[in-house]
Amino acid sequence: MIDLVVVGSIALDSVKTPFGEVKEILGGAATYSSVAASIFCSPGLVGVVGKDFPKKHIEFLNKRKIATDGLSVADGKTFRWSGYYEFDMNQAHTTNTELNVFSSFSPKIPKNYLESKYLFLANIDPLLQIEVMSQLKNAKLVALDTMNFWIETKKQELLDIISKVNLLLINDAEARELMNTPNLVQAARTLLKKGPSAVIIKKGEHGALLFTDSMCFCAPGYPLEEVKDPTGAGDSFAGGLMGYLAGTDDTTVENIKKAVIYGSAIASFNAEDFSLNKLKKITKEDADKRYKEFEKLVEF
């Protein structure tokens, strides 16, 4: 049984930070999200790779009990991203993007995924997100992530899909741009009027804000002593959050608050090493321990 369907990019990344450099490592929004979610539930991945995609990565995903029935292997090369970070680790600088087979990605949901009650639409074209929603009609909670590129090139299509989902994840700069306001509270309130029952604004190392019509919940950032590579932290946050919700099958506001903290915990682990190196090692017990540390951070 697939608890959570994750649709998005699968990539080979090359990353340089002040603490090291890696080349052609496993990345992509759907990859980080599904690996994070697998700590709490059984996710099914939907994406596309080229024939050059190393088999060891598929073996790793399967070892994590991530279903890859929705992973297509197309003629051509796998999506690649290259970038670097300076000492402001909140800002990624892109040096090269090669969409390759991802440029013609047309997601198809396998039959064994169709009964899943949870769907996470990672950062892809809003038209593809709408297409996926039309295939997965039994989902009781659909979450969506996006980025500034779609805000600037397909704003109306993005607003259309936002009106159809239950939960929107967006970072602070994107929320301001999409709603044309410098005030995050105003941006969240306006976004809620567009359709979602909850909006989560990600603030990187400074935590996250959860808004509903009736409340605002502030999650702190975890004070890491060592940050090696923040690539995929936002996707790990989303995957941890959705994985927890799918694993508990509880969509109450109180449980979404807990999911935000678990997502923040997983994202903090992710930033401690390059690529998925840290997420490969952590367990549910590790996540529970850091969850309790988050509780102590805000206890007074």
Image (cartoon, rainbow, N blue to C red):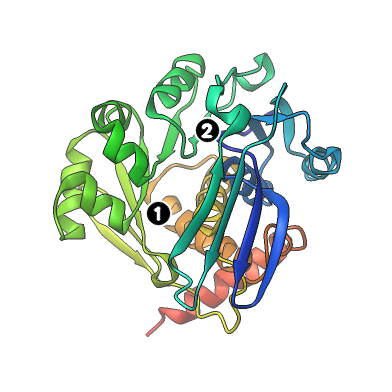
Q: Nearer the viewer, residue 233 or 163?
A: 233
Give the amino acid at mark 2. Tyr
Instruction: Kindly tell me whether residue 12 is visible in this rendering.
Output: yes
Q: Quadrant of residue 101?
A: top right
Residue 88 shows which numbered tag? none
Q: Which residue is mark 2?
A: 118
Residue 212, image x, y percentages: 26, 49
Crowding at dot 1, Cα within 10 Å, few <14 / some 14-19 / many 20+, comes out as: few
Element marked by disc 2? strand
Q: Which residue is mark 1?
A: 254
Closer to viewer: mark 1 or mark 2: 2
Left/right placement of residue 287 relative to residue 188 reads: right
* Residue drawn 58% across the image and 84% down it: 225
Q: Nearer the viewer, residue 206 or 260?
A: 206
Q: Is residue 19 above or below residue 198?
A: below
* Residue drawn 49% across the image and 21% down it: 132
Q: How far apart, in angstroms, are the residues tagged by discs 1 and 2?
A: 18 Å
Q: Is residue 192 above or below residue 279?
A: above
* Residue drawn 44% across the image and 71% down it: 205
Instruction: Kindly tell me whether residue 214 is visible in this rendering.
Output: no
Residue 71, image x, y percentages: 70, 27
Q: Quadrant of residue 64?
A: top right
Residue 199, image x, y percentages: 31, 47
Crowding at dot 2, Cα within 10 Å, few <14 / some 14-19 / many 20+, comes out as: many
Left/right placement of residue 229 relative to residue 74 reads: left
Q: Is residue 255 above or below residue 134?
A: below
Element marked by disc 1? helix
* Residue drawn 50% across the image and 74% down it: 86
Left/right placement of residue 215 relative to residue 169 reads: left
Give the amino acid at mark 1. Glu
